[in-house]
Image (cartoon, coloured by chain):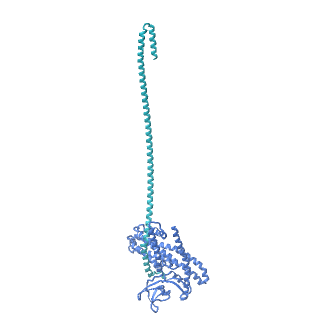
Amino acid sequence: MGFVTPDYGTIFWMVIIFGIVFYILKKFAWKPILNALKDREQSIEEALSSADKARKEVEGLKANNEKIVAEARKEKDMILKDAKELKDKMLAEAKEQASKEGQKIVEAARQQIEAEKKAAINEMKLQLTELSVLVAEKIIQKELKEKNVQEDIVNDLLKDLKIQ
Amino acid sequence: MRPEISKKIFSILLIFILTGFSIQILLAEDHSHDEHAEGTHEAHSEGFNPGEFVIHHVSDAFEWHIFTYKDFHASIPLPIILYSKKSGWHFFMSSKFHHGHSTYKNFRIAHYGENAGKIEEVDSHGHLIDLPVDLSITKAVAGAMFSVIIILWIFLSTAKSAKRNKGKAPKGIQNLFEPIILFIRDEVAKPAIGDKKYEKFMPFLLTVFFFILINNLMGLIPIFPFGANVTGNIAVTMVLALFTFAITTINGNKHYWKEIYNPGVPWLLKFPIPLMPIVELSGVIIKPFVLMVRLFANMMAGHMIVTVFVSLIFIFANLFGAGVGLAVSPVSIAFSVFILLLDVLVSFIQAYVFTLLSALYFGMATSEHH
C-alpha cells in the first residue's frame, strides 16, 4: 500500500509550491480583492446611508415648506382680515361723520330758519306796530269826531291783528 | 449582461468537464489494454490484473502517462532529482528509465518488494545498495505546479479586474469568483473565527479552498495536463494539513494553550495522571491528521471507484470473453459517469469542509473565552 505513506519528495515540493502560491496570492490577489470587496461594501453602505439622509432632509424641507405655506396663508388671512376691519372701520367712521355733518348742516339750517323766522316776525311786529301807530295816528287825526266809528275801526283793526 | 457571461463560463466549464469524463473512460480502456499487454510481456501476472491497474491509476508516478497503443507508450518525461550518499546529486529525465524497464546510472525503479514504486540505487551486478534521497518532480508535483499556474492566472487577473473596477460593479472573471470569496468570508471565516480576527486568516483560507477545489476538479479531467491525482495524494494533503496545524499553533493564544495543558475539568482528571491534557494534546495532532486523511481518502476513493468500474469491463472480458465485456461496458461507463459527477460534488464539498475545519481550528486557537 505505497500510496498511503506520504512521500517526502512530494512533501518537499508541495511545501515549496504551496508556500509560494500562498505568498503570491496573499500579496497580489487576496489583498486587492478583499480590499475591493470591503471598499465596495463600504461605499454601498455610505450611499445607502446618505440616500437615507437625503430623504430625511427632503422630508424636513417638505415639512418646512408646508410650515412656510401655512404661515403665509395665515398671514394672508390676517392681512385680509385687517383690511376688512379697516375698511369697515373707515366706512363706519365715514358714515358717522357724514351723518354728523348732515345733522350739523340740518341743525344750522334749522337754526338759521328759526333765526330768520324770528327776525321776520320781529320785523313784522315792528312794522305792525309802526303801521298800527300810523293807523292810529291817522284815525286819531281824521275820525276822532264820531265815537261809533272810532270804536268800529279799532275793533276791525284788532280783528285783523288776531289773524296775523 | 454580466450574469450571462458567468453563466457561459460555467457551461463551458461543465462541457469541458463532461467531455473530460468520456475521454478519461476511453483512456482508461486504452490503459487496460496496456496493462494487458504488459502482463503478457513480463509474465509476472497473467491476463488483466485489476488491482494493479487501479493502483497504477491512482498512485503517483515518475512520468506523466498519456496513452499506450500496443507497445507504444506516450508519456511526458518528468525530471528525476536524486541525491545518493555514494555518487552525489543526479538530475535526469524519467524517460531514461524507459517506462521503468531499464536501469540508468545505477538507478532503477523497483517494481516489487518493500521498495516497490521507489527509486533504488544498485551496483553493477544489479544488487541493491541503498535508497537515494528522492526529490523528483513526480506526476502529483507536476500536476500541482500546473494547477498552481492556473490558480495564479485566475486570481491575479481577478485581482487586476478588482483593482481596475475599484468602487464599481464587478466584471467578468471577478463576477465568477467574488461570490465564492464572499461565501468563504461570510459563511466560513466570520462565523468560525469571529468578526474581529477573521481578516488575518482570510488569505490562507482562500488559498487552501481554491487550491483544493481546482486540484480536485482538474484531477477529474483526464486529458493531459489535467488528471493528476494531486489531492488524492497523501503527501499533498499532509502538507495542506501541516500548514493548518502550523498556523493554528503559531496563532494559539494563552487561552488556547491553557485549555490544552490545564483544561477546566475536575482536578482528579489532571493531577495524578494528566489524563485530560493528554487527550487535549493528542487532539492537537489528530485534528490536522483527520484533515489530511479525509481529503486524501475522499479524492482517492473517487478516482479508484471510477477505475474499478472501468476495469469491470476487462474482468468480465477476461472471464467470459470479449463479447460479455462489451455487453457490460455500457453499465460500467454509466456507473463511472455517475461516480465522476458525484466526484464533482465531492470536490466542492471537500474543499469547503477542509476550509471550514481549518477556520474552526483557527477560531479555537484565537477565541478569548469559552
Q: From the top left corner, tell me how far across and down residue B132 is, in percent.
A: 43, 86
Tell me the quarter of the picture where residue A76 sits.
top left
Q: For this rendering, which residue is in front, B200 or B165?
A: B165
Task: Please indicate, yes or no, whether residue B30 appears anywhere in the rendered image.
Answer: yes
Task: Give me the chain that's cyan.
Answer: A
Q: For this rendering, which residue is in front, A89 or A54?
A: A89
Residue at 54% over, 72% down: B11
Q: Relative to B320, say whether B155 is above or below.
A: above
Q: How many marks?
A: 0
Residue at 60% over, 81% down: B326
Which residue in the rendered view is the most extreme toward the bottom? B125
Q: Is residue B272 left or right of residue B306?
A: left
Q: Is residue B210 left or right of residue B310?
A: left
Q: For this rendering, which residue is in front, B360 or B107?
A: B107
Q: For this rendering, which residue is in front, B240 or A149?
A: A149
Task: Give the color of chain B as drawn.
Answer: blue
Q: From the top left corner, tell me how far across and down residue B48 is, in percent.
A: 56, 85
Picture quarter with the C terminus of chain A: top left
Q: From the top left corner, tell me how far across and down residue B24 is, in percent.
A: 54, 79
Q: From the top left corner, tell me how far across and down residue A50 is, in percent.
A: 43, 60
Residue at 43% over, 11% down: A139
Task: Please indicate, yes or no, whether residue B265 appears anywhere in the rendered image.
Answer: no
